[in-house]
Image (cartoon, rainbow, N blue to C red):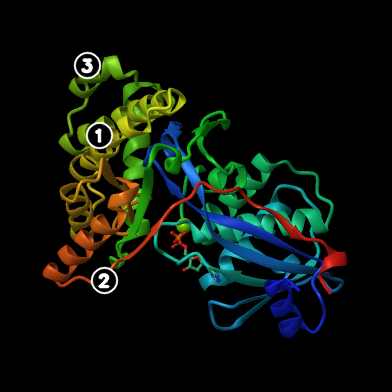
């Protein structure tokens, strides 16, 4: 029997009607571009979160998690932002977002279980909202496609939880495919599956959970997002995505504020780095992506100012130990670093990061190699759940 289904039965005294699995993600490149209508290139991980679910006739939503204490219970018709706080806001918000988008969703029992570390920048939050949206829509026969699921999940996180996120995480979770990176145009949500199999090139994507304590994340994120939107208005474009790289010098001259100039420069150059990375991957030149990753990090550190000491230490140590490129991945202020490394240097690189952490007195990092994996899907049907 499926492990999550067994946990569901223990918690709620009956088998679930299905189990939905949603992966975590890392972003290869394209950071802080999604809320500027730009480009990103995430991959789904084999770390994943599962939601076992069954309908309830009384309109109640009950949620338990194997990773978090307490049971959330709320009536579907009492769902509104603020009605549920803490971790339960993610699954409750997912149901609320579907109702707000006109779907008929009734009561649910939900059991959450996950191997994605939370708050590490691997997007456990989008995995939770996407898995819940998928479960609810499939159980209640709501007519949705994968992009609508991603949009509903984003709606939940930005309007119900209160984190004004872009669409990057949810599109990665919903649309990624094994053996590929997902090139996302966040304006149109047009995507392209770009082949990415590091092992084929004798390479690995070493991922380092920096364990840096996340502080001020929401506020710093919202401040940057607002500043970008103001800059776009000032420049007379719909979004910073519309600033062509060749017009960057003139564009920067048109901005008075030094900080705004730096933020705009990051967004415009980062979009360009994503398109160059995609071109290299299409041409089978993964090794050449290394310097673009490092340039992305420098831009995020100096122009976007979202790095912290633990992150820079991991990036510098990985590069000194022979990584072809390394960068912070995710929104910043902690989270994970990825390094493109020759397969036979993965251990050397990881050890070098651990030693540098030890010298600086930081909490030891966790490391793993990322394998491009599949997006969210139903993994268990009712007939299998006994
Ligand atoms: P990230 O998405 O990078 O992991 P976030 O801060 O965006 O970090 O989301 C983490 C939050 O998502 C957790 O604090 C918790 O509220 C919720 N969450 C993630 N995984 C689980 C889980 N297995 N059970 C319950 N809540 C979870
Ligand atoms: Mg998140």
Q: Is mark 3 within 8 Å of ligand 2?
A: no
Residue located beneath label 3 in the image = 250
Q: Residue at x 28, y 15 (%)?
A: 246
Residue 204 drawn at (x, y percent):
38, 47
Residue 258 drawn at (x, y percent):
15, 35
Q: CA separation, marks 1 and 3? A: 26 Å
Q: Quadrant of residue 336?
A: bottom left
Which of marks 1 and 2 precedes in the sequence?
A: 1
Residue located beneath label 2 in the image = 364
Element marked by disc 2: loop
Q: Residue at x 64, y 65 (%)?
A: 50
Which of marks 3 and 1 precedes in the sequence?
A: 3
In the image, residue 333 sits, relative to residue 339, either above or below, namely: below
Residue 376 drawn at (x, y percent):
64, 52
Is any part of residue 83 visible from this angle? no
How packed mark 3 is, by other alpha carbons closer than 10 Å (few <14, some 14-19, many 20 or more), is few
In the image, residue 208 sits, relative to residue 284, either above or below, namely: below
Residue located beneath label 1 in the image = 291
Q: Residue at x 44, y 43 (%)?
A: 199
């Amino acid at each position: 029997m499926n492990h999550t289904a067994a946990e569901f039965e223990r918690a709620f005294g009956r088998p679930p009607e299905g189990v939905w699995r949603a992966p975590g993600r890392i972003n290869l490149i394209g950071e802080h571009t999604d809320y500027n209508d730009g480009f990103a290139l995430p991959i789904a991980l084999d770390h994943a979160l599962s939601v076992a679910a069954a309908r309830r006739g009384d309109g109640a939503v009950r949620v338990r998690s194997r990773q978090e204490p307490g049971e959330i219970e709320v009536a579907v018709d009492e769902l509104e932002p603020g009605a549920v706080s803490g971790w339960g806001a993610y699954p409750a918000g997912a149901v609320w977002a579907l109702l707000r988008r006109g779907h008929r969703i009734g009561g649910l029992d939900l059991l959450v279980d996950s191997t994605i570390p939370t708050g590490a920048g691997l997007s456990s939050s989008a995995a939770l909202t996407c898995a819940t949206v998928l479960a609810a829509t499939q159980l209640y026969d709501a007519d949705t496609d994968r992009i609508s699921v991603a949009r509903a999940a984003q709606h939940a996180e930005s309007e119900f939880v209160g984190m004004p996120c872009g669409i990057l995480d949810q599109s990665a979770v919903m649309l990624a495919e094994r053996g590929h990176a997902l090139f996302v145009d966040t304006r149109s949500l047009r995507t392209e599956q770009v082949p990415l199999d590091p092992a084929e090139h004798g390479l690995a994507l070493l991922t380092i959970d920096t364990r840096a304590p996340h502080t001020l994340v929401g506020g710093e994120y919202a401040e940057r997002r607002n500043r970008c939107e103001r800059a776009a208005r000032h420049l007379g474009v719909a979004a910073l995505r519309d600033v062509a790289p060749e017009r960057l010098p003139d564009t920067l001259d048109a901005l008075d504020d030094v900080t705004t100039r730096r933020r705009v420069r990051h967004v415009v150059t980062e979009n360009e780095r994503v398109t160059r990375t995609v071109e290299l991957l299409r041409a089978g030149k993964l090794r050449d992506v290394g310097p673009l990753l490092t340039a992305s990090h420098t831009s995020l550190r100096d122009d976007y100012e979202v790095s912290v000491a633990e992150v820079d230490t991991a990036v510098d140590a990985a590069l000194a130990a022979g990584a072809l490129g390394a960068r912070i991945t995710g929104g910043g202020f902690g989270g994970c670093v990825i390094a493109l490394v020759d397969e036979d240097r993965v251990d050397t690189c990881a050890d070098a990061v651990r030693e540098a952490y030890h010298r600086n007195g930081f909490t030891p990092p966790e490391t793993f190699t990322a394998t491009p994996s599949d997006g969210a899907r139903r993994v268990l049907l009712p007939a299998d759940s006994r």
